[in-house]
Structure formats: structure tokens, C-alpha cells
Image (spheres, rainbow, N blue to C red):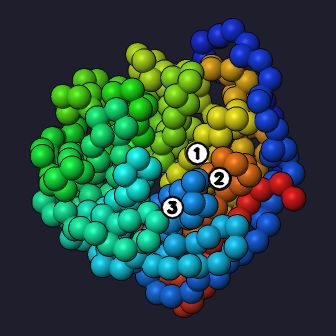
Amino acid sequence: MRALPTLLFFAGAAFAGPAAADPAPANFRVLAHLPLGGAGGWDYLSFDAQRRHLFVTRGDHIDVVDVDQHKRIGAISGTRGVHGVALDQSTHRGYASNGQAASVTVFDLDTLHVVATISGTGEKPDAIVYDGASKHVFTFNGKGHSFSVIDPSTNTVTSTVALPGKPEFAVSDEAGSIYVNIEDTAQLVKIDTTHNTVVATWSLGACEAPTGLAIDRKRHRLFSVCDNKQMAVTNAENGQAVARVPIGEGPDAVVFDEDASMVYSSNGESGDITAVRQKDADHYSVVASVPTQPSARTLALDPKLHRLYLSAATWASAPKEGARPDIVPDSFTVLTVGAP
């Protein structure tokens, strides 16, 4: 991997002190491959830190991996066009967004058994978030340009609300707000989860087609990864632009490791992870570019081990503009990235 230069930033801020932990991102590398094979695409990964389970979305099912045993331990089926998984630890429930069925599959986190299917979301639910403040589940509907609200106590959709464009990833601040990237308008939307209303819409400036989104809840910062090889850092309280950070090509996800003060962008086209050090709330520098594999565009964080898990497969041909390439049959794998 190669070290990259420190960057220039927008508004200054007081120094926040050293990171609480140092997983040595300069030493990060691919530690293991877990071949899962099978047909179909993939999208988001979600990590259950309590049970040490990784949920890997696979088109019509979800593979469940025990990361400590490094093996697949089960699958959740009947998830047509699944995109993401949200977790509610208080009720031991998981929720999967089924893009081709306009529905959400509810399953037990302990047994992995399906307990309900909730129909009636907006068209093509994509990102999905559990919001602890409202105790509701939110789906973000790509084709519907909307978000839907689910009451888990009744397993019903209670409302669907218009958004200004096509929503991508979303995050909750666990204090009454959800934020979501709007891909086609390069905007960031703030939602009041008590009243289920859009309360702010902010421009992401030069960011093009924002997809992945992560949050630093303590310092109120949002990290949007953009198709034009940059990450936009935004103040979650007022929408002000804080920084622009160069990243790799073709990002689709980003995570924030709070204990290590690190942000990681997974870049599927360049086949790497951009590791960004948070010096304080408003200052960031790229410290490493970690080779992964072309196609590894989504990732999840293991906060205990400071490891990253990515879905990938071998491309059968070079990617073309505006289209994802075919993949080699049975080449799907999960990568584990971290320090040795």
C-alpha cells in the first residue's frame, strides 16, 4: 500500500487529542478470503457486533457468516432483490430491504428464522436503518424517491414520505435525526424521526453521485463518498461543508471507526480502501491506500478488532462506463482486511 499526502481543509477547529486506539492502518492488508460462490450480485454488508455475525446480501438471500469461526453458518431466504440489513438489538430483530418486492423481511437475530414479511414500502427499498430514538425502521426507496416508516410493534408501514431525489445510504444519529444521501441531486437530507418529516436539504457542492454515508455521532460529522473520487465531510448540525478528501474510484460505502478516529472508503473500481485519519472534527488526512480487489465496493466494520469486511467477485471483463461487468461464476468471496 502507498502513503498519500496530507490534505488541505476548510474551517479550522480545536485539536481533539490523540486517537483512543491505533489499529495501524498503514499495516492494513487482506488477511483472509472466505469463498461463498453462488450466483447473483450483492450490496450492503451489516455487522452484528454482539453475536459476531456478518450479514452478506446476495440478491435473493442473505448469507450469514460467523467472523470468528470464519465460516458461513446460515442463510435467510425469500429476500428478493435484497439491499441492506438493519439491526434492533433491543428486540433481537433484523430487517432486510427487498428491492424487487417492495417489502421488508423480519428475522430473529438469535435463530436467524424469518418471523414476518412487511409489504407496502415505496418502490425499490434500498438502504434500511433502525432508529433507536423513535424505535422505528426506515427504508429508503430508490425508485420511489421516498422513505417509508415501519412500526416494529405492529410490523406495518405507517407512512411513506417524498424525498427530493433518489436516496442512497442513510444513517441515524440515535438522537432523533436520520441523514440520507440523495444520489441524483448531490444533496444530503436531514429527517426528523419524531414527526417523519424532511427538515433540511443541503447541497454537497462538487460531490457527484454520493452513495455511501457514515456518521461521527460524538463530533456531529457526516462522511459522504462521491463518484468523482472525493469524500465530502459535512457538519450534521448545520449542513456546512467541512472538508473534501480524495479517495479511490467507484466508492459505494464508507465506515467510521470511532475508537480509532479513522474513516474507511471502499472503492470498487480502483480495488482499494482509502484510510483517512480524523485529526479533529474538521481536519482529515489520507494515511494509506489499502489494496483489496476490483469490485469490492461495499464494506462493514468490526469495531472490536478494527477489521473491515468486504464483498467481492472476479470480473469476467473490464468494467464499462455506466454498467457493472459480468463476474466469473462462483467467484464471490468475503475479504477480511486489517492489521496482522
Number of numbered discs visible in the structure rendering: 3
Q: Which residue is mark 1?
A: 255
Q: Which residue is mark 3?
A: 45
**Crowding near pointer 2: few (<14 within 10 Å), some, many (20+)?**
many
Q: Secondary structure at mark 1?
A: strand
Residue 39 screen position, x and y as percent: 46, 87
Residue 178 screen position, x and y as percent: 35, 34
**Crowding near pointer 3: few (<14 within 10 Å), some, many (20+)?**
many
- Distance of label 2 from label 3 (alpha carbons): 11 Å
Q: Secondary structure at mark 3?
A: strand
Residue 339 position (above or below residue 217): below
**Crowding near pointer 1: few (<14 within 10 Å), some, many (20+)?**
many
Q: Secondary structure at mark 2?
A: strand
Residue 84 located left or right of residue 1: left
Residue 262 screen position, x and y as percent: 69, 37
Q: Nearer the viewer, residue 87 or 25?
A: 87
**For discs 2 and 1, the disc positioned in front in the rendered view:** 2
Q: Which residue is mark 2?
A: 302
Residue 164 position (above or below residue 310): above
Residues under numbered marks 1 and 3 in contact, where contact means CB atoms less than 8 Å apart = no
Q: Nearer the viewer, residue 334 or 211?
A: 334
Disc 2 or 3, which lies upstream in sequence?
3
